[in-house]
Amino acid sequence: MTIRSRAPRPTGRPASRLTTGLAARLTATATAGVLALSLAACGGTTKESSSASGGGKSDKNATANPNAPMKKGLKIAFLPKQVNNPYSTIVDNAGIAAAKEFGAQAKEVGPSDASASSQVSYINTLIQQRHDAILIAANDQNAVCNPLKQAMSQDIKVVAYDSDTNPACRDVFINQASSEDIGRSQVKLLADQIGAEGEIAILSATANATNQNTWIKYMQDELKKPEYSKMKLVKIAYGDDDDQKSFQQTQGLLQAYPNLKGIISPTTVGIAAAARYISGSQYKGKVALTGLGTPNQMRKFIKDGTVEKFALWDPANLGYLAAYAAGALASGQITGKQGEKFKAGKLGERTIGANGEIILGPPTVFDKNNIDDYDF
Ligand code: RAM
């Protein structure tokens, strides 16, 4: 069972509930078996207790106590890849709201570019400010590793979300979906649109991004299957999650590879910029584009026929789950070991998997039939 709760509705569009018919049309790209998770559709912050002690650091040698109350007044900070990315805004705002649910104070800080070392000074400041937990979408798994270890040595809990760092440098990683399923399903989405034949390219985020690089690795592996033998990956380009650079990289790809049949852009910034370029070019309707995008950014390109289908998970739920994991760590309910369980508010009980990974759930595929049912 999959919960897809609504994200904040910035445009004020009325929320329509998913009907059974629509739910049936949604293509869950992960297999059910991936999620050894119990997604109870209810629950609240049942661990909260007014008698909980306020804001102290949890003992790092303590064993997990699943019945420990959620501490009140925890200070937690979200450090996204970059602050001026609409995707990060949705994730972090939902995380900040979730933190309020269990009585924590949360904020978002971060760089305006997604370069490798841009997050280091922020980590150092958060350590000095004695936060209880730092949540980070790592721009570079190595660049942030030592500063995060520094934080952990001072008993600050570290939650990677969206983009992982080295497992030794965080307590848990909140993964939006199975990385393997995201990567493989992107190839399938494009193959469906180009008859599994022709030259293709990938327009990624930064060259260091752990999440995109992991997905690309699975895309390349998927392309080795016999059914894709007529699809040829000719180039991986990097738009650095910068709108203008992504736009220019799209233009460059289409000029350099006149036989290009399709592009996969596994970044919300990249796919939106690529769609904008293609929609105003001679390639519209000729070169397929898919990837990971937000419905609100992609709606007009679905409607004008530039894009047939693309995917994403619910970014608000990603932030929500990350916040609860941070609270559970800082309250001693979990320590990050495989098999430990905690209650994640409306998302129900969650279990830590191998390598400290906690998976949100399968992504949704958006097309002209369902895009108006989403507003984020
Ligand atoms: C961009 C970022 C983010 C990624 C999404 C899909 O916003 O690169 O890390 O998860 O796209």
Image (cartoon, grey):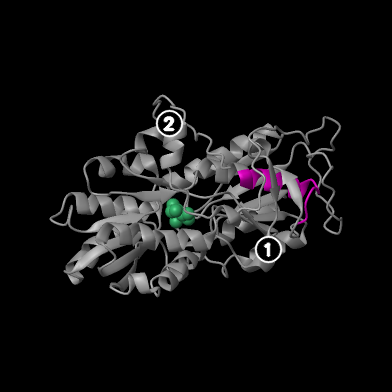
Identify the image quadrant of residue 225. Answer: bottom left
Three-letter amino acid code at the position of disc 2: Pro
Q: Is residue 159 left or right of residue 253?
A: right
Q: Residues within 10 Å of mark 2 (few under 14, many from 20)?
A: few
Q: Position of residue 173 (x, y in %)?
A: 63, 57
Q: Which residue is mark 2?
A: 10
Q: Position of residue 113 (x, y in %)?
A: 44, 57
Q: Which residue is mark 1?
A: 354
Which of the marked residues, 1 or 2, is nearer the chain's N terminus?
2
Q: Is residue 236 left or right of residue 118?
A: left
Q: From the viewer's perspective, is the residue at label 1 or at label 2 nearer?
A: 1
Residue at coordinates 38% horizontally, 63% vertically from top-left?
A: 187
Placement of 211 over or under 105, stated as above or below: below
Quarter of image, ligand 1:
bottom left
Q: Is residue 206 left or right of residue 322?
A: left
Give the magenta part as a residue range: 321-335
Q: Magenta region's main secondary structure?
A: helix
Q: Is residue 361 left or right of residue 21?
A: right
Residue at coordinates 27% horizontally, 51% vertically from top-left?
A: 275
180 magenta-colored: no
